[in-house]
Amino acid sequence: ILWIEQEMQKPETDWDVPLLVTQMGNVAAFLKMLRELDDALEFIETALSLIDQYDLGLRQFVAQSLRWADILRYRGEVGEAEEVFNSILEICNENEEVRVYKD
């Protein structure tokens, strides 16, 4: 978490955005396991925002969206989580690049 905070204090042009997004997703997953679900949601939503802002591609989007859906499920937001899971499944069925995430 400290590295992420330090990275985000730098000028945005100095960010290693793909690494930042990956680490945010990792932190979100660990926070979910610790049941720090609000913090996990904040990290993963920031990661998804950066993916969109910097057009980091479908693989990053799918990987982090799966984490997002899982965090939603843990928060008891089952309906929204299922919608996300179903959307991701559809994307995986339509795109060879991310089909590996289907399982």
Image (cartoon, grey):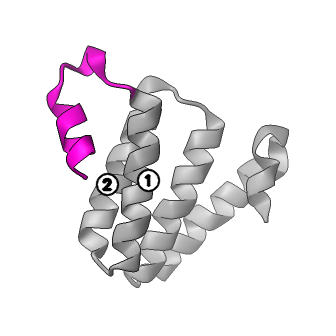
The secondary element bearing badge 2 is classed as helix
> For the point 38% across and 61% down, which residue is it?
28
Q: Residue furthest front?
A: 3
Q: Give the image location of residue 47, x and y in percent.
A: 39, 45
- Residue 48 appears anywhere in the view: no
Q: Identify which residue, 64 or 6, lies in the foreground.
A: 6
Amino acid type shown at disc 1? Gly
User: Closest to the observer: 39 or 2?
Assistant: 2
Image quarter where the C terminus lies is bottom right
Residue 15 in magenta stretch: yes
Q: Is residue 99 left or right of residue 51?
A: right
Q: Is residue 50 magenta?
A: no
Q: Name which quarter of the figure residue 76 lies in.
A: bottom left
Q: Which residue is mark 1?
A: 25
Measuring 65% from the left and 57% from the top, which residue is drawn there?
Answer: 87
Dot 2 crowding, Cα within 10 Å, few <14, some 14–19, many 20+: many
Query: Label 1 vs label 2: CA separation?
Result: 7 Å
Residue with the mark numbered 2: 43
Q: Considering only vertical position in the picture, is 68 above or below 71?
A: above
Q: Do tag 1 and tag 2 residues touch (Cβ < 8 Å)? A: yes
Looking at the image, which residue is at 32% across and 46% down? 46
Residue at disc 1, secondary structure? helix
Q: How many marks?
A: 2
The disc, 1 or 2, on the residue closer to the chain's N-terminal end is 1
The magenta region covers: 1-16
**Residue 84: quadrant of the picture:** bottom right
Image x and y of residue 59, in percent: 65, 41
Q: Amino acid at mark 2?
A: Phe
Is residue 78 visible in the rendered structure shown here? yes
Q: From the viewer's perspective, is 103 left or right of 31?
A: right
- Residue 31 is left or right of residue 19, and the answer is left
Query: Which SS does the magenta portion mostly show?
Result: helix
